[in-house]
Amino acid sequence: MSIKNIIFDFGGVLVDWNPRYFYNDVFHDKEKADAFIKNICTAEWNAQMDEGRTFAECIAEKQTEHPEFAREIGLYFEGWPKMLKGEIPEGVSMLKELKASGQFRLFGLTNWSAETIDYAFTHFPFLHDDFEQVIVSGQEHLKKPEPLIFERLLRKTGIAARDSLFIDDSLPNVQTSRAMGIAAIHCKDYPSVKAEITKLTGFVFN
């Protein structure tokens, strides 16, 4: 195996996004906020926007389903920036070191709404500037862990699966990547990720 390309997920690897950062302040009660996110504005619901549906239509639909939470659901889009807490220093440092080495082509593959990705690019420029190309689920109307978005990545970038390595904090995404012939690392802690990169590529971090 000769890894020439490294593909990064964004949320959970390079940036810290969590709706609890916003809804803890809305409810002023972490248990109520947690219940709201687990049962109302769920990860599965948010994934619809990551796949290309608009915030407006998803919010309106959810308000119809749960009128008792109409106000809180209605805040989801305007409160979204507060859900994006900041960069993950260990992940960004790893990215920067790989980029500085000049040994790899770097790409992004993220589940992210087309309506909010520009905010992320503006506030965290490395998400755009440090990658040769970024594939955004909301723009493609496809999302991980569907095999089709990995096929879209390979086609748009022209890279070969056998020459590529993918890093993601979601195990289903990692499993699909491997099934597609793309080596993958499940990001649970950064020392382990770095050790695995070294094992697979021979690159030694400072």
Image (cartoon, rainbow, N blue to C red):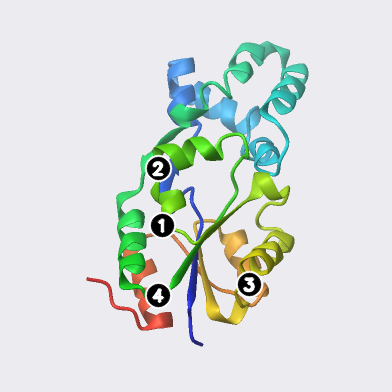
> How far apart are labels 1 and 2 at the CA level?
10 Å
Question: Mark 2 and mark 1 in contact (Cβ < 8 Å)?
Answer: no
Does label 1 or label 4 sit earlier along the sequence? 1
> How far apart are labels 2 and 3 at the CA level?
26 Å
Please name the residue that numbered disc 3 is placed on.
158
> How far apart are labels 1 and 4 at the CA level?
21 Å
Identify residue type, mark 1.
Asp
Identify residue type, mark 4.
Glu
Q: Residue 17 at x, y = what percent? A: 46, 39
Does label 1 or label 2 sit earlier along the sequence? 2
| Residue 130 numbered mark, or none | 1
Q: Does the image show residue 139? A: yes
Left or right of 156 on screen, residue 169: left
Left or right of 103 on screen, residue 171: right
Which is nearer the eye, 110 or 18? 110
Please name the residue that numbered disc 4 is placed on.
196
Q: Give above or below for 106 relative to 31.
A: below
Element type where label 2 sits in the image: loop
Identify residue type, mark 2.
Phe
> How far apart are labels 1 and 3 at the CA level?
18 Å
> How far apart are labels 4 and 3 at the CA level?
25 Å
| Residue 138 numbered mark, or none | none
Please name the residue that numbered disc 2 is placed on.
124
Does label 2 or label 3 sit earlier along the sequence? 2
